[in-house]
Image (cartoon, grey):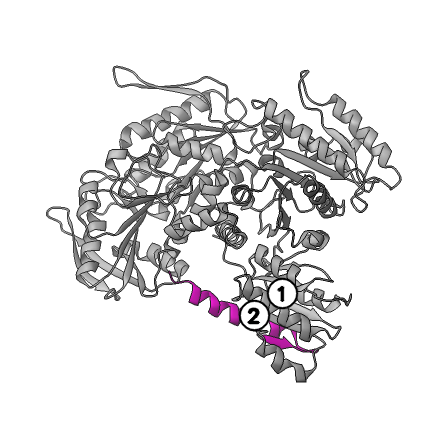
Amino acid sequence: MLAADEPETGGGASPVGRSLPAGEASLAERVVSGDRGALARALSLIEDAPFGPLASSYAARESDAIVVGVTGPPGAGKSSLVSALIGELRLHGRTVAVLAVDPSSPVTGGSVLGDRVRMSQHTGDDGVFIRSMASRGASGGLADAARAAIGALGAAGFDVVLVETLGAGQAEVDVAQVADTTVLVLVPGMGDAVQMLKAGLLEVADVFAVNKADLQGAEQLAAQLRALSAESGVGADAWRPAVALTTATTGEGVASLLSAIDEHAAWADAHPSTLRQGGQPSSRRAVSARTEQGLYGRLVLATGTANEDLAEKIAAHLGEDLLPRDVVQFANGNTFVRLTRSVRGADVFWIQPTSPPTNDNLMELLIAIDTLRRDSAARITAVVPYYGYGRSDKKDQPRVPITARLVADLITVAGADRLLTMDLHAGQIQGFFRIPVDDITARHQLADFARHRVVAESTVVAPDLGRAKVARNFAEEVDLPLAIIEKRRSAKDGKPYVLNLIGDVDGRDVFIIDDEIDTAGTMAGAAEFVKERGARRVHALATHPILSDPARERLAEAPIDEIVVTNSVAIAEDARPPRTTIIDVGPLLGGVIRRIHMGRSVGEIFNE
Amino acid sequence: MSERRIRVLVAKPGLDGHDRGAKVIARALRDAGMEVIYTGIRQTPEMIVESALQEDVDVVGLSSLSGAHMTLFPRVTELLAAAGIGHVLVVAGGVIPASDVAALEQSGVAKVFGPGTSTADIVKYIRAEVRTEDTAGAGG
């Protein structure tokens, strides 16, 4: 699944998510073959770009490894217990990878990762691989890259992946979303029985480890946990968390802890519907929905018909299901939306880019928002990865509308509380709304991809003056010089024609960047122009592949070596131009949705 | 996205148990925004190199106070090269007589920081060295 995309064939049901730079593909192969250096490198690439193509492909991977999360308050002895578990697993000949997460300084971004200290006896054992990871600003007890890193460790063939979180507080329950089995490490003397009933960390535990069992009060704590466990769960076959008494330093009780973990894993396999659906590593779905409750009720993801594939990828990233609904077009052309499950009191994200057929997709979005509002959703966020009519944003000639503003009013009046969109044609469109707008960018994903293509003599090119700012930011990010094409539209036939080039492309590889490729007139024209001026390879990058006619023909004929776009807009297989790579922005949008839901900073993802 | 962070492994090879200096360095590098993996005391060169490989670090910082540096440090650089990660920058500190510095640098230790070196100098040195490596490696 990590093989390089073969652009010429264009076959396969889903073109998205398979596209990786060639260098990465061989890296992925080396990871699978057990090359520890390659695995280490892959983990670094994932950390540096937790929403990049490599990370996305690993995050979506179904892993054969059993993933065990080990969490608990600071000082409970998590690292020592992990080390003891490694020893126990190795006794049985099972291979182990460890992902140990420690906090990053919120001030400097630096960190001291000290978990290896307690595990150093296992360094040098070929069946063990230990990797430290800094949280890099993520809250929830794990790093943003953790899910993908776990996927990579699974791909490398380890039997068990142990994930040690940073010292967790009661709300830091992320680990339950990535682990098959979550072990909560507690120690005696941390609070009375009332603490136990508190929501949060206690709820996500599949197995309790009462560590430092030689201390006074350990038996009492274990008894309280057993009582709590007996009350938990509904139905006869519900899992009741096991309790193990351990002393990590001597290894006492570690064997029975491992048995409890294996027992839970076996139970989970036998009860797939209560646990993992579609193989997504989201262990306690029911619990996670409850503990993940944000400011506006539970999270509900729903999609219109414009880009269901993207919606599925977002849902997969979040380990959620899409809301069941019917979207019907009647014979008279009227659109009808019906929810088959209530969203009363929920925090709903409705995914619908307003790409062509723009009017139909927009109308469907408005009707969906009205449907949600009438079903008493607590908050409605319109997720519009591509904002149609965005180019109609000013009166640039007499007697014309400003449709981008009209659409903003329509979405607001329909009842949306919030808009999440991506790479707006003009950032000012945010100001057309009175509701909050998150305009995120896929620039980082494109830049991550471009970095693998950059040769020493490369230049970023803005295809027109309007794109200069976007191109400059991109050039800065990939650390390349910038050239700008000065282009003017002919008043007569509306076709762009090129006038001038500011900067140098002679003998250089160029990366032309635009927000969208519509009819591809701009992109094809720019490619021909830089080629005339002596450019070598030409890469065409854009966020939104609108690809209206005759884009496919134009791009096929233009001197473009490679086209890179995202899946913000669905591309029909027959409209896909040759030599095209599609970057999956599902994980990016998923990450942002999760942050909006939890009331956390969105800018954090983008280092803002 | 996240900018690339410099990753440093701080290790104490050999048998001396005093890691106060190593911890001061770890903290200074952290405060300079680096990600420091601290392995603790009594590490063999083999353990250090295996950790460096797994953690994919840019820099290995070695500290020794026991006088065994002439045996242990060259062994680390040798094993790094054998593991295919000879590009990792190796810096050293601790109690190292001036007369040994040239021989250590000959053996692949990039720089030896003696007692009294300011942590700011070490940070500056690592940033400069790793930065150069990075740009060189950015092509292709």
Residue B131 magenta-drawn?
A: yes
- Report the predominant secondary structure element of the magenta stretch: helix
Given the current orientation, which residue lies at the most extreme bottom position? B99
Q: x%, y% of residue A68?
A: 64, 38
Q: Secondary structure at mark 2?
A: helix
* Position in image of residue A238 (x %, y %): 67, 20
- Would you say the residues marked 1 and 2 are in contact, meaning their CB atoms lie under 8 Å apart? yes
Residue A107 falls in which quadrant of the image? Answer: bottom right
Q: Which is nearer the eye, A299 or A529?
A: A529
Residue at image coords 77%, 26%: A228
**Residue furthest left as drawn:** A492
Of labels 1 and 2, earlier in sequence is 1
| Residue A471 drawn at (x, y percent) | 33, 56
Q: Residues within 10 Å of mark 2 (few under 14, many from 20)?
A: many
Q: Name the residue carrying label 2.
A: B126
Q: Is residue B5 magenta?
A: no
| Residue that carries the numbered disc 1 in the rendered image | B29
Helix, strand or loop at mark 1: helix
> In the image as oriented, which residue stretches furthest toward the right?
A216
**Vertical placement of residue A567 versus A287, above or below:** below
The quadrant in which residue A409 appears is: top left
Q: CA distance from mark 1 to mark 2?
A: 9 Å
Chain letter of the residue carrying label 1: B
Instruction: Say what amino acid the circle numbered 2 marks.
Output: Ile
Range of the magenta residues? B111-140
Label annotation for residue A191: none
The chain carrying label 2 is B
Of the 4 image quadrants, the one containing the N terminus of chain A is top left
Question: Is A435 left, or right, of A265 in this rendering?
Answer: left
- Depth order, front residue of A279/A539: A279
